[in-house]
Image (cartoon, rainbow, N blue to C red):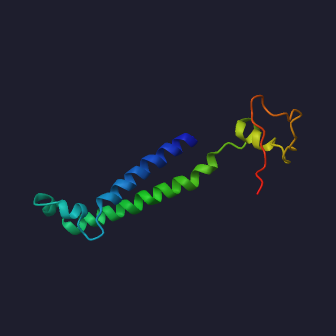
Amino acid sequence: MLALFGVLIIIFSIVLGLIVLIQNPKGGGLSGSLSGLGNQLMGVKQSTDILEKGTWFFAAIVGLLCLASPAFIPKDASSSSENDDLLNNAPTAAPKATTPANTAPMPGAQPVVPATK
């Protein structure tokens, strides 16, 4: 069910984005590109009203889907993911740093001599 909500949110978000991109804040947009028969049937003012109502409608649908989807997240212990188990069983203290037992220089390496002034 949660996957269905995710798919619906993505679809409605894409449609919302397309509706917003069609609009032009200066009144051009779809209403400015309609000509002749399109303007006579719908009218320029009516096309901007439809786009604005569509924007509000799809924004409300996406908002409601986002608010409703957490109600469908399973709460039982058997559905917890491996990441939750790793986080719950993580160590709380950092491991102590240890010095290596063998501190001899590598064979063939030149010894570091401090520079003198």
Q: Quadrant of residue 76?
A: top right
Front-most of residues 16 and 84 = 84
Please identify the residue farthest to the bottom as the structure is shown: 26
Quadrant location, the C terminus: bottom right
Task: Please provide percent x and percent y for residue 105.
Answer: 81, 34
Quadrant for the N terminus in the image: top right
Q: Is residue 16 left or right of residue 74?
A: left
The quarter of the picture where residue 3 lies is top right
Residue 35 on image: x %, y %: 13, 60
As rendered, which of 60 and 14 lies closer to the eye?
A: 14
| 54 relative position to 71: left or right | left
Task: Tell me which residue sits at (25%, 63%) in the image.
Answer: 29
45 with respect to 20 (left or right): left
Kindly tell me whether residue 42 is visible in this rendering: no
Residue 117 versus residue 92 in the image, above or below: below
Is 76 drawn above or below residue 116 in the view shown?
A: above
Above or below residue 24? Residue 6 is above
Q: Is residue 71 visible?
A: yes
Q: Residue at coordinates 86% horizontally, 48% vertically from top-left?
A: 93
Q: Give the percent coordinates (x, y) of residue 99.
A: 87, 40
What is the residue that sits farthest to the top in this orientation? 107
Q: Position of residue 47 (x, y in %)?
A: 25, 63
Which of the two residues, 22 or 64, is positioned nearer the viewer here?
22
Q: Residue at x 76, y 51 (%)?
A: 115
Question: Most extreme residue toward the front, as rendered?
Answer: 117
Total numbered circles: 0
